[in-house]
């Protein structure tokens, strides 16, 4: 009897295996030391990302739905739980880099065990458990982006600034033209996930929002434009900055985007292909909400609201643009024509990450996924060059604190009409 391919038997099995394989491919260039170190409290070791995403599946799928399943290692829930209070005590986030053992090889063996157990159980799992496998895949895709950006941050702390991947072949690209404007929809619009396909809980419920006359820029701000902001004293002029932002600039001595350095020939940036001259045509990235807001003020504009952004982006293909397809060089690319709302850089909005009208967290530990973080954070939209393709939607709400900038974060301007 001819075997039925996984994809034909279950699209979820194919998705599960593809997602899990990409995480392993992303860490292939790392040594055990690379995978163990933690460069700051906001970041996590690569080894931890690999183990935590496996713990998530082992805990919420295998432990809770597979009769007779025995945990791979009784110590792992304490080591690799992230923030799920309902799952008990856990190792402190700031000390994850001190977990030198288990080794990278042992974590990869743990992943292989979880992969085999989930794949074997999947055909017989109830729908609720299959939904958790889908959530586990989406959760891991979030961690794949964090994994890449955490590796960039770690390598940037090394005085020799090692290149992890060979640089991509540079294709000459013309500088983008002058910034254009797309007039947005005015009046009542519907935003939030419409219920078709997967979405995180924070993306709903779908609800009406009132938009006043406005326009959005037809592309994001470039490195060259940001260099002009710096040259015009952008980081030295308090009138463009929010009070908290100006205090942050002064306290942290911020003078440029993260990973930028001034050299004799101009500005350079660090990435996983080493330190190179900035591409003036490429989108600026690794800027905080404070920097994005200050740039918008300097440019005589503002940041879009998330409702404005979603209404404008809804007609475009969320799988388009420069997103992560496989392990390899990850870097924003210059715009090549036409408005693009997905990929390259996450775009800061002027909206706070708060619940939509009617939002309710689901029951159980997975209800802690988003709702508990709806305080003091700002919404970003659109995905980045490090977002796995197929992961984002127009309704997708990413969120970070206003000072954070180690993700691929950039700026799209808006203005009132």
Image (cartoon, rainbow, N blue to C red):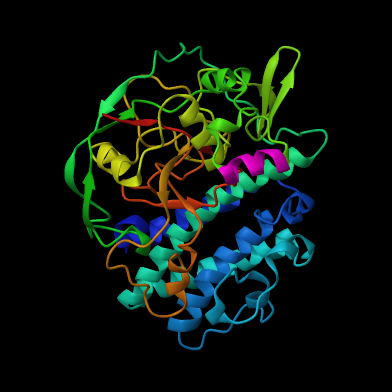
Q: Quadrant of residue 323?
A: top left
What residue is at 59 percent from the left and 65 percent from the top? 52
What residue is at 75 percent from the left and 56 percent from the top? 36
**x%, y% of residue 165?**
65, 33
In this rendering, position of residue 43 left or right of residue 331: right
Instruction: Reply above or below: 361 against 231.
Output: below
Residue farthest toward the front in the current orientation of the protein: 239
Q: Which of these two is toward me, 375 or 259?
A: 375
What is the tally of numbered marks visible in this picture? 0
Residue farthest toward the left in the current orientation of the protein: 187
Helix, strand or loop for the magenta stretch, by majority: helix
Q: Is residue 28 visible?
A: no
**x%, y% of residue 181?**
30, 23
In this rendering, position of residue 148 left or right of residue 373: right
What residue is at 37 percent from the left and 72 percent from the top? 361
Look at the image and tell me in which quarter the C terminus lies. Answer: top left
Instruction: Reply above or below: 83 against 305.
Output: below
**x%, y% of residue 230?**
61, 22
Range of the magenta residues? 243-251
Q: Which of these two is toward me, 219 or 108?
A: 219
What residue is at 61 percent from the left and 43 percent from the top? 406
Q: Is residue 54 magenta?
A: no
Instruction: Reply above or below: 27 against 17.
Output: above
Q: Is residue 394 visible?
A: yes
**x%, y% of residue 194?**
22, 56
Q: Quadrant of residue 371?
A: bottom left
Residue farthest toward the bottom in the current orientation of the protein: 68
Look at the image and tell me in which quarter the N terminus lies. Answer: bottom left
Instruction: Reply above or below: 396 against 347.
Output: below
Q: Which of these two is toward me, 414 or 132?
A: 414
């Amino acid at each position: 009897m001819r075997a039925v391919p996984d994809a034909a038997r279950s699209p979820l099995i194919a998705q599960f295996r593809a997602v899990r394989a990409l995480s392993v491919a992303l860490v292939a260039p790392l040594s055990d030391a690379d995978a163990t170190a933690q460069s700051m409290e906001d970041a996590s070791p690569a080894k931890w990302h690999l183990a935590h995403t496996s713990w998530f599946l082992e805990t919420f799928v295998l432990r809770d739905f597979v009769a007779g399943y025995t945990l791979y290692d009784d110590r792992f829930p304490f080591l690799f739980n992230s923030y799920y209070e309902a799952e008990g005590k856990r190792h402190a986030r700031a000390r994850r880099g001190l977990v030198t053992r288990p080794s990278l090889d042992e974590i990869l063996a743990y992943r292989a065990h979880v992969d085999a157990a989930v794949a074997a159980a999947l055909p017989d799992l109830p729908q609720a458990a299959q939904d958790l496998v889908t959530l586990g895949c989406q959760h891991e895709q979030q961690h794949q982006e964090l994994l890449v950006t955490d590796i960039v941050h770690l390598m940037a702390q090394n005085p020799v600034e090692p290149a992890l991947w060979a640089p991509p072949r540079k294709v000459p690209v013309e500088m983008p033209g002058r910034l254009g404007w797309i007039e947005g929809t005015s009046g009542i619009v519907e935003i939030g996930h419409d219920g078709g396909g997967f979405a995180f809980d924070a993306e709903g419920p779908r609800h009406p929002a009132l938009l006043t006359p406005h326009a959005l820029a037809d592309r994001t701000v470039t490195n060259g434009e940001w260099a002009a902001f710096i040259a015009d004293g952008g980081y030295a002029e308090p009138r463009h900055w929010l009070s908290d932002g100006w205090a942050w600039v002064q306290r942290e001595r911020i003078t440029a985007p993260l990973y930028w350095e001034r050299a004799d020939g101009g500005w350079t940036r660090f990435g996983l292909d080493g330190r190179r001259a900035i591409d003036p045509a490429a989108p600026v990235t690794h800027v905080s909400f404070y920097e994005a807001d200050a740039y918008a003020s300097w440019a005589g504009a503002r940041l879009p609201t998330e409702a404005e952004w979603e209404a404008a982006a809804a007609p475009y293909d969320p799988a388009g643009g420069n997103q992560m397809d496989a392990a390899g060089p990850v870097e924003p690319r210059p715009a090549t024509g036409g408005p693009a709302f997905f990929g390259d850089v996450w775009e800061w909005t002027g909206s706070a990450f708060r619940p939509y009208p009617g939002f309710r967290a689901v029951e159980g530990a997975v209800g802690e996924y988003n709702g508990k973080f709806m305080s003091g954070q700002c919404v970003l939209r659109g995905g980045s060059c490090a977002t796995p393709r197929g992961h984002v939607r127009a309704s997708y709400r990413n969120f970070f604190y206003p000072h954070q900038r180690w993700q691929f974060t950039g700026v799209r301007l808006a203005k009132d009409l």
